[in-house]
Image (tube, rainbow, N blue to C red):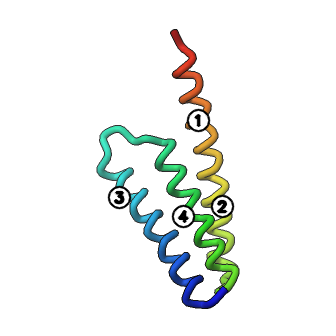
């Protein structure tokens, strides 16, 4: 992958983080499913970018961010399933 492509992918991941953070701060009712999905996608895109322009500190941060987002996403999906199965 070229450096330019890695930069574009990393910028898209950063845009997802910024968008999710802004949404969390202005939303009256946070949709945890979408919030965590955006954060997970952003972390994955930044990790892809880091495969070309490696930085250990950023790699550790994005890995942790992605794991936290994946956990939050699983919890949000489980809560949605429980909510929909109630009579």
The residue tagged 4 is 42
- Label 1 neighbour load within 10 Å: few <14, some 14-19, many 20+: some
**Tag of residue 22:** 3
How many angstroms separate mark 3 from mark 4 (CA)? 14 Å
The residue tagged 1 is 77
| Residue placed furthest toward the top | 87
Tell which of 61 and 2 is nearer to you: 2
Task: Indicate which disc, 3 or 4, sits on the residue closer to the N terminus.
Answer: 3
Task: Indicate which disc, 1 or 4, sits on the residue closer to the N terminus.
Answer: 4
Q: Position of residue 84 (x, y in %)?
A: 53, 21
The residue tagged 2 is 64
Find out whether the residues at labels 2 and 4 contact each other: C-beta distance under 8 Å. Answer: no
How many angstroms separate mark 1 from mark 4 (CA)? 19 Å
Residue shown at 50%/56% (left/top)? 38
User: Nearer the observer, disc 2 or disc 4?
Assistant: 4
How many angstroms separate mark 3 from mark 1 (CA)? 22 Å
Task: Indicate which disc, 2 or 4, sits on the residue closer to the N terminus.
Answer: 4
**Above or below, 36 relative to 82:** below
**Secondary element at image label 4:** helix
């Amino acid at each position: 992958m070229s450096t330019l492509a890695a930069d574009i992918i990393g910028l898209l991941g950063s845009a997802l983080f910024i968008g999710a953070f802004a949404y969390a701060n202005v939303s009256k009712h946070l949709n945890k499913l979408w919030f965590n999905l955006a954060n997970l996608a952003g972390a994955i895109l930044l990790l892809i970018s880091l495969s070309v322009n490696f930085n250990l500190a950023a790699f550790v941060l994005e890995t942790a961010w992605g794991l936290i987002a994946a956990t939050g996403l699983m919890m949000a999906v489980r809560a949605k399933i429980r909510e929909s199965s109630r009579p």
